[in-house]
Amino acid sequence: MITNFYETIYNTIASPQFLLATITISFSVKTYFLSILIPQGLKSSHIQKPWWFLLGVLFGSMFGDIAWMIKLFRELWFPYSNNYGLITFFIRLAWGFLILQYQSLALFIESLTEKNFKLRTIHKVMIAIGTSISLYFFYLAFFDTSLTTETERRQAKELAQVPTEILVMRYVVYYLFNLLLFPSLYVTFKKLRTANLPLILKKQLRIFIQFLIFPYVVVEFLQAARFLFKSFQNNFYPVVSVSTVLLIYAIYYCLQRVMGLRFLNFASQVQSQHKVNFIDDFKNVLDQLSYTTSIQELGHIIQIFLKDAFQIPLRKSIVCIRSSNASREVEPKNNGESNKIESMVESFMNNHDSASAEFINKQKVLIYDEIAFTNFYEEDEVKKNILNFLENINADIFLPIYEKQKIVAYLIIERHARLHEFYSSVERDEMIVFASYLGNILNLLKNRNVETIIQQENELREELYTRNQEMQQYKESIRSFLRNTRQKEIGIIFYKNRRFIFGNQTAKELVKININAQEGHPFTQTLKNLARQVEEYKSPQTNTVKDTMGNKLVLCGVPNLEQSSVIITIYYPEISDIITKQIVLLKDPAKWDYLLYLETTQAGQLINQLIPGSGELLLHFKINVLKAALSRKATLLEFPEEDLLPVVELLHHISNRETLHTITLNHKEKNFEVAIKLFSISPALTSNSMTGAVMSSLLKKLDNTGTIFIKNVENLDIETQEYLAEYIRTGHYRMFKSDQKMSSNVRIICSTHQNLQTLIHEGTFSKSLFSIINQTCLNFPSLALLPEQELFNMMDEFAEQAVKTHAFRNLLEFTDKEKSKLIISRPESLQELKTKVQQALIQKSKKNQIFNETQFDPAYSISDPELTEAVRLGKNALRDPKIMAVLWNKFKNQNQIATFLGVNRSSVNRRCKDYNLQ
């Protein structure tokens, strides 16, 4: 079996099909790199001679591939063809270009090591010889008709008196290797050892020699070996196939790496060969910097960061802070060496010319190897001065740190601190970003304003969180429209003589009811009202209605004067349809996005359910609620007592947090009990029996998962308020009566019924806490001051939420007179208005004798979005492990869960065991 397997592999590799495939790929790879090299070379400020030589190598090699492809094509598809002359023509051309190819390769190797390469006498002699041999083969290709058939050429190789053409083919190999390639390699190796070449260029040469020239020579030697060794004749195809595959990889790998190393100065920086996990390292260093209180600590943090982010060994980097007299080093290695470096840097900073200053400002970071390589091709005095400066201070990298366009510090990475690897363009940009941030850190540390850093960091995290939440809302909004892309057809309905006629099949599919028979249905009523308005005003009218599934539909009616009828189009709304009616109420264009989110996202639906209705006051308030929900900033609520918990549960749910903890303060805080509960207290201030109870703070328990609602925040002790203000401002809290800091990500929501500014003047409320929580303050507009029409719209929406039976909604619809009577004494809260609407609906259903048939929403009086979903599912909620977990966390009692769902306790008990809810 193994023998058969190896035999199959050999036969595959030895087949002309496999060889044709490899030659074709080889040709394609060379074409690919030509397509890159040619445009880059033409765009360069001046065309380099190595570029021409490399093009000559690739072009000459491609002619050999062409000859192979033509020969194999004939062998595979026209094996009995007698026309071998075309193949002979291309074979001779390929041999002619092979000489030019090797001549270009030899010159290319030598030209890389010289700034301005010039042909010497030996080069000219070799070029003359090579050109003569090439012209000989070109002459044979165009004018010689002998040895043009396959049989003649095969027999010629066996003759004792070998023809001149075959003889030249045999001995030209010695010329190519011994007189062209090997002398050039010798000269190149000698210059690599003696000449002061840039490291990037040396790396390029090693890659070329190791991964291109050596494999290339081996491949060419194997192909030419059939002229030297007869044993190669029988195994010629597999040898060429394998060698070509290896050569393809070598060419691709070599040129990819060399192009990344700024080949011929085409690129301005070394390109990245790997991705550094910079963001994670940067976040880690931000956390460390948040605790930094002195410049001395900063040096160690920077060294750790450079090691993790850029693999720079410790003690191979120094940071110096400049002062008015002299600079001082953050982490000195030894006084003598550091003072010497500082004096050299200060001397250069004070004495360098404007051109050097402009170069430094433009580059942002000085990388020795990059500048040396650029100077090799584009030499000038500025680069020479910069290189001398970097050599004097023994630096691979000199990174200036700016403050207001002035260099206030600098970071030096020692020469050869990172062996065998260059600094890429990505790493360069990352260093610039780090230096920019470090400049601000140094400024703040000098001014001892560490709190500002921590506060800015916390504000940045909050802003990123808000932007991410807004992006999620935007995506959800777009998805809501994409879901209806298959339903973009427009339904057409004709209204004439008080009857509706469907104009197409789409209208029937969208309406789904008999609008002529079900005259009392809300859908029919809306259609009739629209049609009557069009007939009355003789102008187009637009309205919205919900289908049987609760999805919005747009109705557009236009008069048809010729036939005395009305044409009504019906379709699912687009973005413009959703926001057109309400966008006029928003003068600030920045709020238009939030209007879209309110109408199309789940968060918007929850807010519209809690605060239904439309109008300018309500719309602005709902947008403020949505903004607060999408943020994690501390929020102050000024709501009626009954509406507080529903709003808190809404904000908590939209924030995707798991645990809501409520702290109710009906009286002034005593003995700092809330402070100890929130922040814990230092063990040194507690007895042994209390240590376990206070060590774990509420902020630690609920980190990343919880929301804390502090009801009547004005009753907190003034010292507790200051601790809370510090946590909200910085994202770090101190253990009570301690300087130990810890971070937490718990959302804080507060409420009050007092005028906090008055309390500030009285000295009973923290000014700093008020300035923070008042930034996101939600003050519900008084229903007593709400315009009557907005209040009426709110009542209609509450009525629609309460009644699930569409058939009876027209019988239960409130008239304006009934609405006015209902709100003679304006309700103080949304919950009071909601309850009044529900009671009025129940009375009206009893009066019309449809109470038993009317289905009222069981979740109508429930404000918690999670409980709302559970109660609507009823007994089906038992099948959902996630909902059952929510119910268990809410009630912690199986009897209460059974009562809430209206099921037997035994069913709840069985499900709790199945889901491990104990």
Image (cartoon, helix red, strand yellow):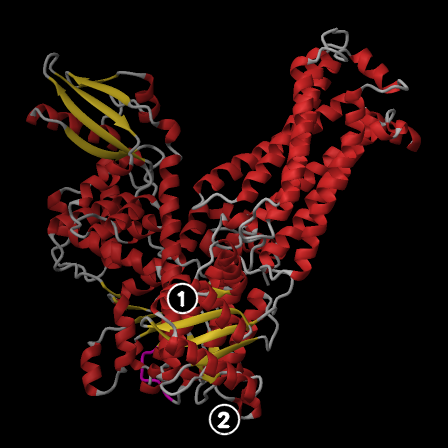
Residue indicated by mark 1: 360
- Left or right for 455, reference 562: right
Do callouts 1 and 2 mark residues in contact (Cβ within 8 Å)? no
Tell me the tag on residue 128.
Answer: none
Q: Secondary structure at mark 1?
A: helix
Residue 896: percent from left, percent from top? 48, 60
The answer to whether residue 907 is seen in the rendering is yes
Q: Residue at x 15, y 45 (%)?
A: 584
Residue 685, numbered label: 2
667 magenta-colored: yes
Outermost residue to the left: 537
Residue range in magenta is: 665-670
Q: Quadrant of residue 577?
A: top left
Q: Residues within 10 Å of mark 1 (few under 14, many from 20)?
A: some
Residue 484 inside the magenta-drawn segment: no
In the image, residue 167 sits, relative to residue 901, either above or below, namely: above
Side of 80 relative to 916 (left or right): right
Identify the residue shown where x is 53% and y is 89%: 683
The numbered mark, 1 or 2, whose residue comes first in the sequence reads: 1
Residue 529 seen from this side? no
Amino acid type shown at disc 1: Ile
Dot in front, 1 or 2:
1
Vertical relation: 360 (above or below) 882: below
Position in image of residue 129 (x %, y %): 68, 33
